[in-house]
């Protein structure tokens, strides 16, 4: 390609415009989440690194779906529109097997006549998938706004039954279900319009197959609920005391004040309803408020009232899992979301506490101070409390009457430590999903959170307990899982296979729980990442596997202090950069550590002391480096990019010697620059053009030599963080080789 002098001068003017763009797109220094940009991974990078496997389903997307991860049988079932897919959990890209299960044609026509959308509503969207036994899966779908259910081994039209009270009518309606002991527990709408919401039990072994449900005649039981999840949990060592705990948010009225509140409720698994009152309705139903708030300095808390998702993290005691909950604000002015953690002991304590009482519809709930009947309302019929009461039909009438009008507990359930463990406010997304992986690291056990957002990203966050029992949440990664950003609708985790399954309307994605290579090729960078899944193995940052034989692996999650784990932590890259007088110059420095705060220091020419660079209108600090809009003589010197970690550990990432090239010297090189442009062609990047024009070298050969030295592999230069400790071994080897060659030369000369 031929380049004219005019084209070259156009390029010179272009550099000013490019640096002006740097200024316009920079992140403001006061952004508290600036450092998180370091670990944002776009979808294209995940594909390039083979870090994601995708199943996109139909060409028009999945819209609504359900997931069933069966690790025992090694299968992953995906319920979608008119189909159930059987996927390989180890490779989603592998061709799936599928069952076609459309809605009956007459139901589709009726759905269209009701004004519903043909593709997005008038189909059979599979919303329920549960293991029924060793051979069958129980499935329910919306059936074109006429829910249907079946046991899936193969679908037969004669076995299809009604799905009402088991599955929602609307494919986008929030609901939950769980199948245990052959009973299906579901929280869903009971009508076509979705107004009446109820929590029910159905199925079961013959002859006990009657529906048990909440009382919809009283709105203080459940009112316009959005059900989130349901879980069978044992309360004592007696299985007769086992309960179903379910979580939802609902509309609540306190006098004339309307609000949305989050609830945890429970029912006994052996509840069969009342004898004369509450027939075929729950006689053990109790609920309590679930609070997630940030305490304010003036005593006014900031509440996150809208429950989004629940994850039960098992512990050694199956009766006491940790409850992770995602909340969002209900305010249209203040947007934010939070993660709170609860203990089952605190939840049970609230259900064993005082009841709430309300005199009438226009009154507020107050603490009930009257006599409580026996047995205590909400307890299960079992030998634990009274051997004479064998079923809920044996409850005295006053017990059934009491629980009918007092389903709410007076006290609320508060999170561990009294506040959220993770919050996101004033950001352009809301947290929607949560799963948790418990990881055993070199210095203890940690809980790693994977959080889905409505912007289509997945955050990886680690919870770290400090010396004073305070908790710290560190964002490790932010992944753009799908090419088109769409809300994350589901998350499933396999700690056994170390895999994460992410669902949205775009499809289903499979990710490894760790991507250690993203933390760089240095010991200090790996240590500073504080990812419990990763450790430095002496050569690279790789997945950490606890084993007695692997003592050499370096990891410090609690403190993230590379000074105690790595050698040569002060090694840094040194670069010479030439600026042009009165023109812009950019000093690049991008930290690998997401927790790093960057500070710039300069040691000016003729001075032995370094001073901190103070950004102003002329000198602008961005998340990628330091922009000097107009270089002056006083700017010449050695610049140091220093990373200040949260642990007070500081290390220099890069040193740059800034030299100044006068304008008259640039003019003398214009002709030489034209010739060099002809040789270089179109492939050279802008910063290389600038370096070429500002370089003091006088020939193309010298420029290429200097460029080659800078672009050599890090291993060859022996100057990267964490590999410098092996440099002395390389020097010894080189010295031996040189001595050996000299001896051979002497022998040759003698001959």
Image: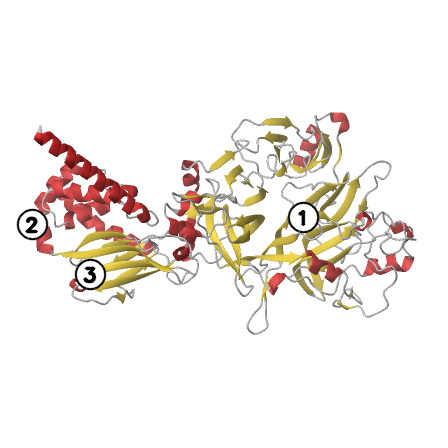
Sequence-earlier tag: 1 or 2: 1
- Comparing 152 with 505, the one in front is 152
Near mark 1 (Cα within 10 A), the count class, few <14, some 14-19 or many ≥20, is many
Q: CA distance from mark 3 to mark 1?
A: 61 Å
Judge left or right: residue 301 versus residue 188. Answer: left
Near mark 2 (Cα within 10 A), the count class, few <14, some 14-19 or many ≥20, is few
Q: Indicate the quadrant where residue 109 lies.
A: top right
Q: Is residue 167 visible?
A: yes
> Measured along the vertical axis of the image, is residue 142 above or below residue 524?
above
Q: Indicate the quadrant where residue 679 lies.
A: top left
Q: CA distance from mark 2 to mark 3?
A: 24 Å
Sequence-earlier tag: 2 or 3: 3
Sequence-earlier tag: 3 or 1: 1
Q: Which residue is mark 1?
A: 229
Tell me residue 564's x, y (percent).
41, 56
Mark 2 residue element: helix
- Foreground mark, 2 or 3, reads 3
Q: CA distance from mark 1 to mark 2?
A: 74 Å
In the rendered structure, are the residues bearing label 3 and label 1 in contact, judged by CB atoms less than 8 Å apart? no
Q: Which residue is mark 3?
A: 637
Q: Which residue is mark 2?
A: 668
At x 20%, y 43%, the residue is 707
- Comparing 259 with 92, the one in front is 92
In the rendered structure, are the residues bearing label 1 and label 2 in contact, judged by CB atoms less than 8 Å apart? no
């Amino acid at each position: 390609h031929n380049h004219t002098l005019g084209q070259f001068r156009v390029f010179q003017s272009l550099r000013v415009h490019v640096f002006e763009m740097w200024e316009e797109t920079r992140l403001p220094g006061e952004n508290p989440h600036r450092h998180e940009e370091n670990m944002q991974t776009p979808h294209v990078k995940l594909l390039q690194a083979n870090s994601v496997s995708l199943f996109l389903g139909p060409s028009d997307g999945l819209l609504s779906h359900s997931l069933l991860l069966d690790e025992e049988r090694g299968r992953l079932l995906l319920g979608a529109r008119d189909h159930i897919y059987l996927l390989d959990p180890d490779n989603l890209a592998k061709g799936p097997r599928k069952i076609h299960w459309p809605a009956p044609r007459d139901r589709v026509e009726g759905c269209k006549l009701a004004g519903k959308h043909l593709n997005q509503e008038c189909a059979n969207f599979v919303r329920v998938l549960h293991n029924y036994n060793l051979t069958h899966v129980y499935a329910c779908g919306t059936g074109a706004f006429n829910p249907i259910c079946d046991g899936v081994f193969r679908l037969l039209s004669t076995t299809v039954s009604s799905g009402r009270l088991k599955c929602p009518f609307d494919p986008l309606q929030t609901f939950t279900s769980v199948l245990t002991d052959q009973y299906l527990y579901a929280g869903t709408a009971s009508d076509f319009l979705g107004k009446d919401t109820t929590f029910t039990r159905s199925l079961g072994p013959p002859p006990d197959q009657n529906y048990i449900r909440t009382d919809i005649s009283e709105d203080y039981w459940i009112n316009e609920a959005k059900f989130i999840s349901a879980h069978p949990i044992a309360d004592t060592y007696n299985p007769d005391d086992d309960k179903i705990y379910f979580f939802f948010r609902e509309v609540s009225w306190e006098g004339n004040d309307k609000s949305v509140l989050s609830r945890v409720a429970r029912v006994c698994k052996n509840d069969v309803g009342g004898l004369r009152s509450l027939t075929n309705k729950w006689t053990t139903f109790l609920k309590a408020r679930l609070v997630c708030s940030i305490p304010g300095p003036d005593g006014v808390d900031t509440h996150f009232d809208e429950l989004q998702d629940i994850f039960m993290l098992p512990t050694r005691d199956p009766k006491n899992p940790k409850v992770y909950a995602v909340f969002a604000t209900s305010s249209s002015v203040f947007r934010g979301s939070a993660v709170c953690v609860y203990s089952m002991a605190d939840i049970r304590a609230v259900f064993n506490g005082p009841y709430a009482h309300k005199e009438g519809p226009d009154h507020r709930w107050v603490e009930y101070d009257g006599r409580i009947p026996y047995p205590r309302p909400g307890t299960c019929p079992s030998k634990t409390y009274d051997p004479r009461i064998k079923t809920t039909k044996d409850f005295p009438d006053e017990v059934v009457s009491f629980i009918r009008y007092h389903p709410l507990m007076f006290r609320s359930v508060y999170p561990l430590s009294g506040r959220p463990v993770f919050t996101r406010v004033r950001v352009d997304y809301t947290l929607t999903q949560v799963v948790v992986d418990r990881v055993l690291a070199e210095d203890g056990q940690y809980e790693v959170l994977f959080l889905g957002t409505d912007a289509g990203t997945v955050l990886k966050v680690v919870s770290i307990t400090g010396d004073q029992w305070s908790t710290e949440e560190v964002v490790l990664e932010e992944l753009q899982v799908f090419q088109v950003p769409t809300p994350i609708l589901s998350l499933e985790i396999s700690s056994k296979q170390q895999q994460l399954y992410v669902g949205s309307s775009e499809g289903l994605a499979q990710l490894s729980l760790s991507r250690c290579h993203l933390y760089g090729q240095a010991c200090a960078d790996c240590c500073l990442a504080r990812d419990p899944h990763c450790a430095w193995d002496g050569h690279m940052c790789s997945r950490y596997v606890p084993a007695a034989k692997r003592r050499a692996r370096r990891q410090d999650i609690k403190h993230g202090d590379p000074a105690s784990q790595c050698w040569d932590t002060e090694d840094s890259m040194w670069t010479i950069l030439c600026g042009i007088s009165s023109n812009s110059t950019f000093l690049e420095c991008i930290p690998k550590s997401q927790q790093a705060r960057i500070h710039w220091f300069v040691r000016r020419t003729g001075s032995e002391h370094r001073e901190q660079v103070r950004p102003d209108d002329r000198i602008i600090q961005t998340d990628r480096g330091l922009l000097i809009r107009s270089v002056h003589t006083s700017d010449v010197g050695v610049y140091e990019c220093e990373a200040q970690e949260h642990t007070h550990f500081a290390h220099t990432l890069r040193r740059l010697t800034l030299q100044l090239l006068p304008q008259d010297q640039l003019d003398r090189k214009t002709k030489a620059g034209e010739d060099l442009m002809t040789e270089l062609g179109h492939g050279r990047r802008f910063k290389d053009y600038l370096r070429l024009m500002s370089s003091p070298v006088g020939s193309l050969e010298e420029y290429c030599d200097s460029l080659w030295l800078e672009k050599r592999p890090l291993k060859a230069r022996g100057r990267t963080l964490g590999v410098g400790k092996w440099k002395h071994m390389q020097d010894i080897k080189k010295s031996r080789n040189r001595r050996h060659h000299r001896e051979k030369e002497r022998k040759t000369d003698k001959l």
